[in-house]
Amino acid sequence: MISRAEALAHIAAIPQMTGTVSVAIQNGVGRTLAKPVIAQHTQPPDRMSAMDGYAVRIADCALDQSLTVIGEAAAGHPFSGEVKPGQAVRVFTGSVIPSGADHVVIQEDADRHGQTITIVDAQGAARNIRAAGIDFKAGDVLIPEDFRLAARQLSICAAANFAEIEVRRAPKIALLANGDELRPPGSKLAPGQIIASNEYSLTALVEAWGGEVLNLGIAPDDPAKIRARIEAADTADVFVPVGGASVGDHDHMKTVFAELGFQPIFSKVAVRPGKPTWMSRNEDRLVLGLPGNPASALVCAHLFLRPLIARLLGSDDLQPTVRASLLAPVSANGGRESFLRGRLSYSDKGERVVLPADNQDSSLLSPFVTSNALLHRP
């Protein structure tokens, strides 16, 4: 049995996957960049007005000064002339500032009568103009390679004039449930049978972490049938069998993978829940076995599957960690690192507090209804 840190070190040593694909930017959320996003133009390309008003020369802006309006620059329709002494051009937010102007008088500071404006409020220093390239310049690296995209980055990809982006191929994660007792949701259960529930949360997590799910369904406790499902998933990068990893007479998962040429990396991890978590490898294909108990499977997916997917994609696994005050005592961990389900919130004083779930039994799913955090007890 190895420590969690040792297990994560094994995961960190796995080579990054190769292979890239191009996707439309609207499909980029959760994908990892294979190439940096480099600005193809300057943004904004010209000096732009930050306000509705009049583009003028600041030297002409004495109080009660009158200026002649010689034209208009609407957004997308620049004024082609030059602002000379005693002149002004009507501008709007986003308008290109015409040549010769170095200041925008906001419309509230000017009285207009026909083609003449009068400055009615002292202007001080030149302002209300956004410089060309204030956001980014052509050739700037806006987002680096191996960056995992969130929704907030898609707009800058578009602004940099990318319709498509090149991203890492999503690792194909084959989920395989195992057990004679398991039945899909909606089944009429016979004595001794239970619903196979792990698949649904695991599928959502894998997709959120950047993987592509291959659902291999439920394999009975039959080595030949387990093997057939594994062999059918010839495109899988990572197999994630759930259950079947203990030492009972009906636990065949490790044996079947060993017969298929997978060599063990580790067989147990000193964590609670999740001691039976195991990992094997056959060249560039991997197995990360998760415990069959629902809470153990989901907790260990966060602890080990998430960093594995991140490693394959070449991105950092940045799981947020914060300190919080316990609202209830927790029991001793018995020599293994413990990860307890709980609810993180804020007290009336604005301090982070966390309430552990009442029952931490690894077979229970109900604590996940209100839990939004894992409490780490080293």
Image: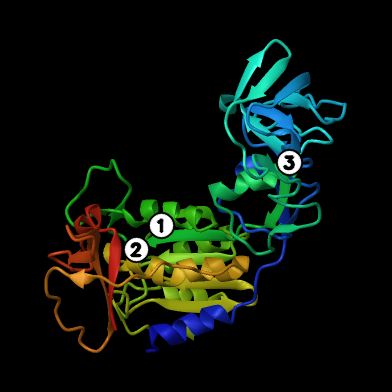
Question: Is residue 136 visible to the viewer in this orientation of the structure?
Answer: yes
| Viewer-side residue, 40 vs 224 | 40
Q: Which residue is mark 1?
A: 202
- Give the side of residue 356 with respect to residue 181, left or right: left
Q: Dot 2: what SS?
A: helix
Q: Earlier in the sequence, mark 2 or mark 3?
A: 3
Q: Which residue is mark 2?
A: 298
Q: Dot 1: what SS?
A: helix
Specify few, some or many for label 2: CA neighbours under 10 Å numbering under 14, 14-19, or 20 or more. Answer: many
> Which quadrant of the view contains residue 275?
bottom left
x and y percentages locating residue 322 in the rendered image: 34, 70
- Does the residue at mark 1 contact the one at mark 2 (Cβ under 8 Å)? yes
Q: Is residue 223 above or below residue 181?
A: below
Q: Residue at x 77, y 20 (%)?
A: 68
Q: Earlier in the sequence, mark 1 or mark 2?
A: 1
| Viewer-side residue, 373 vs 279 | 373
Which amino acid type is shown beneath numbered disc 3?
Answer: Ala
Q: Residue at x 38, y 87 (%)?
A: 3
Q: Quadrant of the N terminus?
A: bottom left
Q: Which residue is mark 3?
A: 163
Which amino acid type is shown beneath numbered disc 2?
Answer: Leu
x and y percentages locating residue 348 in the rendered image: 17, 57
Q: Earlier in the sequence, mark 1 or mark 3?
A: 3
Q: Is residue 32 above or below residue 61?
A: below
Q: Quadrant of the C terminus?
A: bottom left
